[in-house]
Image (tube, helix red, strand yellow):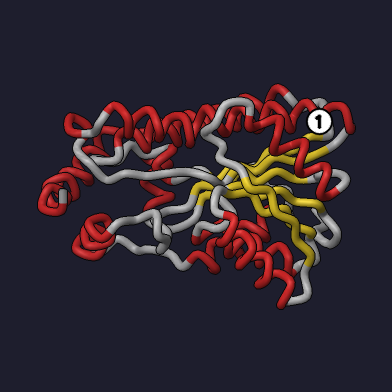
Amino acid sequence: MELKDLHVVITGATGGLGAALSLALSAKGAIVCLVGRDAVKLHALQQQVIAQGGQSHIVVADLAQPNMAAQVLKQSLREMGHVDLLINNAGVIEFTEFARQTEVSIDNMVHTNVTATLLLSKAFVEYFVERGRGHLAFIGSIFGSLGFPHFATYCASKFALHGFSQALRRELVDSNIGITYIAPRAIATPMNDDRTNAMWQASGQSVDDPQQVADKIVRALQKNQQELFIGQPQSFFAWLNGLAPRLVNIGLKQQTALAKRFL
């Protein structure tokens, strides 16, 4: 995929990975449309894009609100003229015991990570089909292939996104619409609260820099990769989980006990 002059819509643009990805794509010559809820943060990121010689547009939107998918597509087209690539990056996470997680939190996570993403993807797929080409990228997680203790609802949402990306890719196999699924491990972003960061540190889990992850995603898009799993040994365990989940259970038993100290 040639990134120069590519028109890209990025949801969750002002988050740690979203911002890094927006700047990395802009540095390659892409024209980025930054989608998020906070207008102040969006304008600040836009100024960063401009400062490095890039072009960007802004769409202020809360994807949790009804009928927002059509509005985001409409505003993106108004700002950019056309769209070549949608990057579904917006998402939420919570480190908690499932039995203690509130219904509001569960509903919000499933709606943000799954329902809103699917509805937005549907709107853009319809547009790409009409246009005759396009590409969708989904920022998933290693936890979309590896059920991890105390992230049960988050894992459920990312497993759903992984399965959706596979199904949609197969459904569109005879079209000019591409699908890329990206599965990072933990990233150093504001999404992780202090308890989560303390737990990662105590367990010795690697936490990646957003810029390094963004650079790998950019390379994957340039190569039109279907899937990208980032980080070892987490990627290996995600693969092993599909073959021998009981072995992974044993490996995660100590992690489960350790995590309880930080709940």
**Which residue is found at the position 42% from the left and 59% from the top?**
187
Q: Is residue 172 visible?
A: yes
- Residue at point 22% right, 32% down? 98
Query: In the visual, does 2 lie left or right of 144?
Result: right
Q: Badge 1, how many Cα within 10 Å: few under 14, some, many 20+?
A: some
Residue at the top extreme of this rendering: 171
Q: Residue at x 39, y 42 (%)?
A: 143
As drawn, 206 above or below 87 = below
Give how far across and how far down residue 84 sits, in percent. 81, 45
- Residue 65 position (above or below residue 80): above
* Mark 1, secondary structure of its residue: helix
Where residue 105 appears, x then y in whole percent? Answer: 32, 34
The location of residue 185, given as percent across then percent down, is 42, 53
| Three-letter code for the amino acid on which mark 1 is drawn | Tyr
Which quarter of the figure has residue 168?
top right
Residue 151 position, x and y percent, is 29, 40
Which residue bears the numbered disc 1? 127
Q: Vertically, is 144 above or below 47?
A: above
In the rendered view, does 127 fall on the left or right side of 148? right
